[in-house]
Image (tube, rainbow, N blue to C red):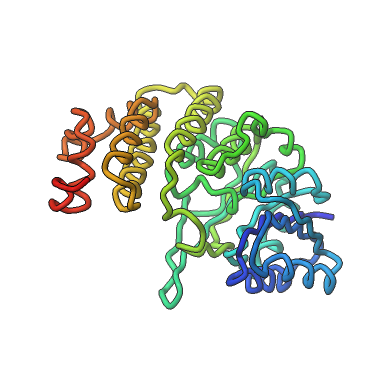
Amino acid sequence: MQFSLMIPVFNAEAFLEPCLAAVKSQAFTDFEVLLVDDGSTDGSGAICDRCAEADRRFRVWHTGNRGVFAARAYAEQHARGDYLLFLDADDLAEPALLQTLHDAIGRHHPDLLTFDFLTFRENEAPQRETFLDADAFLTGAEMEPFYRFLLSTRFNAVWNKCFHRKLISRAPDYAAFAGLRHGEDLLRSAYLLTGAESLYYVHTPLYRYRVGGGFAGRFDADSLIQSDKTDRTVRRLLSEKVDFDASWQAGYDDLCRKQLDNYVRLLAYSGTSLSEGTALLQKAMQTQLAACALSAADDSLKYRLLRRGRYRTLLCLYRGKRCLHAQ
């Protein structure tokens, strides 16, 4: 069997059937699908079961809710294909996905393949994300541009990568990262990319990513602490492959800045009280991630306030002047 497509599922009832239909419509048919129902409380589990009953290529596991990181790890342990791919349950695979990858594997036998993708919202034209100007087979130092792409927020997803099963063992210590809910894609992608000795890039969009379909826009108080841990691991992995000089550090610092920006924005609009929000920001600013972010930041009012510890004032500026006298 050439491909194992691994799909973690959690309360994806609204989007799951189109996702599975797109998989069934693949032009290349030598594949299996592993559906890990991660404790869904809607109709997702029943959809998975019906699909498996109708098509023997689909297998289903129902587990407790442990998060997408654990669900993906579980799927990897049960995959039987020579090459493995992750899909998100609210996204769509292009019909030519597997055929295109099969053809590239037949010509080059890479450890890792990656490809362009489209981002889309309902009733809006999709936007293409691309990385090089043409297809490319890369080895050794030639892969360095993709190490740099890893520090961008547009390349850290696992679903635009297909990897040989020998890279299953090139994985994080799942016990050490138990409960991880933020940075899981970046972490797994870093292990795959730095573990591969060869890479084939497909200059064709083969995947459709649904913007806003998951949990990216929801505030989680622990998110920056978790991202700090994954970022430090990613930096270590990259340092084993390249001379992590000032230009690399600048890219890493900019990644941290984007993560801190997102944390502050989501916290400000989360409805958290000013006192609790101030305490959370104070804790977050103790991380290495925050220190790197500040070194990459400009001299805007937001970062002047963060550097001076004026966390309450910053939250009030986001929420409006009225909150200066509240709580």
The image position of residue 149, as x and y in percent, is 46, 42
- The total of numbered circles placed on residues is 0
Q: Quadrant of the N terminus?
A: bottom right
103 horizontally vs 80: left or right: left
The image position of residue 58, as x and y in percent, is 80, 63
Above/below status of 195 relative to 131: above
* Residue found at the far bottom of this picture: 123
The image position of residue 49, as x and y in percent, is 79, 68
139 horizontally vs 217: left or right: right
Above/below status of 297 relative to 66: above
Residue at image location 43% in from the left, 53% down from the top: 218
Instruction: Name the foreground residue: 258 vs 285.
Output: 285
Above/below status of 233 relative to 139: above
* Residue found at the far front of this picture: 327
Instruction: Name the foreground residue: 311 vs 126.
Output: 311
Q: Quadrant of the C terminus?
A: top left
Residue at image location 74% in from the left, 52% down from the top: 63
Residue at image location 33% in from the left, 39% down from the top: 276
Instruction: Name the foreground residue: 20 vs 118.
Output: 20
The image position of residue 37, as x and y in percent, is 71, 57
222 horizontally vs 281: left or right: right
Residue at image location 32% in from the left, 32% down from the top: 293
